[in-house]
Amino acid sequence: MIVHVAEYLAWIISALLGAWMLFDAVKVSREHPEEFLTTSVEGTDELLASPAAGQMLSATEEETS
């Protein structure tokens, strides 16, 4: 009996997560253009915003110069 209840709960949770993922995908595709979503350049600016990352970036730039 408890196994059946746990199985149904797992399916319900799985369906809710799938619906949430679908809703989020539609929401993101409406808020951002396709070019923004398919490039990785925009994400690097946010990742390198911390001071430590900035120091690493400037050290890398010096090495390549």
Image (cartoon, helix red, strand yellow):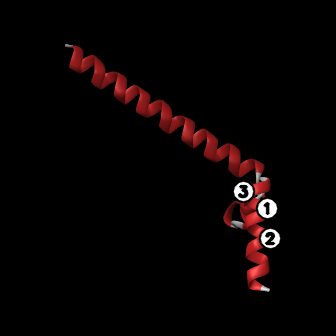
Which residue does the numbered mark 1 point to in the structure image?
54
Q: Earlier in the sequence, mark 3 or mark 1?
A: 3
Q: Nearer the viewer, mark 3 or mark 1?
A: 1
CA separation in Å, label 2 and label 3: 14 Å
Q: Disc 3 vs disc 1: Cβ atoms closer than 8 Å?
A: no
Q: Nearer the viewer, mark 2 or mark 3?
A: 2
Q: Position of residue 37 (x, y in %)?
A: 70, 60
Q: Is residue 51 shown left or right of residue 3?
A: right
Q: In the drawing, what numbered circle is on residue 58?
A: 2
Q: Disc 1 vs disc 2: Cβ atoms closer than 8 Å?
A: yes
CA separation in Å, label 1 and label 2: 6 Å
Which residue does the numbered mark 3 point to in the structure image?
47
Instruction: Identify the residue at image location x=28%, y=17%.
Output: 5
Q: Is residue 30 above or below residue 64?
A: above
Q: Is residue 4 above or below residue 49?
A: above
Q: Quadrant of residue 20?
A: top right
